[in-house]
Amino acid sequence: MKVIHVLFRSSIGKKFTMAVSGFILFGFVIGHLSGNLQIFAHPDKINAYAHFIESLGPALWGIRLFLLTTLVVHVWVAAQLTIENKRARQKNYDKQVTLRATLASRYMRVSGVIVLAFIIYHLLHFTVRVTHGTEAYPTTILADGTKVRDVHSMIVLGFKSPYIAIFYLLSVGLLSWHLAHGLVSMFQSVGLRTRAWSHVLERITVVLSVSYFLGNALIVVAAMSGKVRIQNPSVVGFTCRDTCEICGLRNAEAIVENADAVEDNQS
Ligand code: HEM
């Protein structure tokens, strides 16, 4: 009980809670990006990966609940700290320092709110799957015959609209900025931002957040520009290539026949 009181009531405890929850969320977004980058490999790769995650069943729900609680705690404690800061600002500190700190924390708040709106849209888009028609959520068959959701095509279809693609780019841009500042604050809160390495730390966080942005942007731009293409013959927008990556067959009809044969074998 006392620990909860310290973590959620004292100013230092709140900052520590922000740091720990932020670190967990940071771990998730890096892991998520690594998973999503599999879109550049054969479609089976990302589809099998998504299928594996889904097959975790109750454990997946446990992880989702844990992440959601972490996000709620992160946002709630951030709101508490904002109120505290506002009160503190009314007292007289060095004007220059206060102005800089105020601007940074204002951008942290604004970027945080937009990222939150993005997360809600994103969950409706890919997890609840209600933002697009059913044709945007196809299924496919893996090489071993397992019928799975075709996350590869879902992503490509998702970024067909330039408005959605731009919204994603803007959101991950803000999230990257949020991460850069959040990581520095995190080290400060746990007392690991010493004068000696503050400069290095800032550089590391900039490299990390720019790489994070570029990784996400690469996916969006590749899907939007047709660099990553739909490779599922049952999906509208599929165009067969001479050397097809799906199964080595040479035309769409043959691929459809092959998919039908796999399905027949299953039933
Ligand atoms: C280009 C950027 C992104 C792409 C292509 C992408 C793609 C996806 C896809 C396809 C899913 C559904 C996976 C499935 O159902 O198997 C998903 C789920 C999810 N994404 Fe993203 N994502 C992106 C960025 C982000 C960002 C920046 C965040 C966080 C701020 C995020 C948070 C989530 C969450 C929380 C889920 C739900 C996981 C679950 O509970 O199943 N995503 N994403």
Image: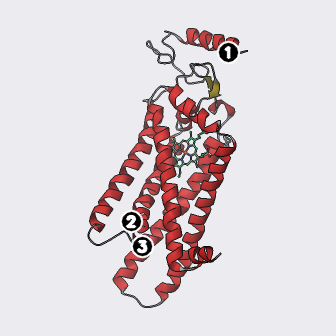
Q: Residue sitting at 64 percent across and 37 percent down?
A: 54
Distance from Cα at disc 3 to Cα at disc 1: 58 Å
Q: Nearer the viewer, residue 85 or 71?
A: 71
**Quarter of the rendered image showing ligand 1:** top right
Q: Which mark is residue 263?
A: 1
Mark 2, other Cα within 10 Å: few <14 / some 14–19 / many ≥20: many
Q: Amino acid at mark 3?
A: Leu
Quadrant in which the C terminus is drawn: top right
Residue 94's spot in the image, x, y percent?
Answer: 36, 87
Q: Amino acid at mark 2?
A: Val
Q: Which mark is residue 103?
A: 3
Mark yes or no: residue 166 visible: no
**Front label number (3 vs 1):** 1
Mark yes or no: residue 64 visible: yes
Asked which secondary structure carries label 3, the reply is helix
Q: Nearer the viewer, residue 4 or 265?
A: 4
Q: Which mark is residue 184?
A: 2
Mark 3, other Cα within 10 Å: few <14 / some 14–19 / many ≥20: few
Which label's residue is closer to the chain start, 1 or 2? 2
Residue 191's spot in the image, x, y percent?
Answer: 39, 72
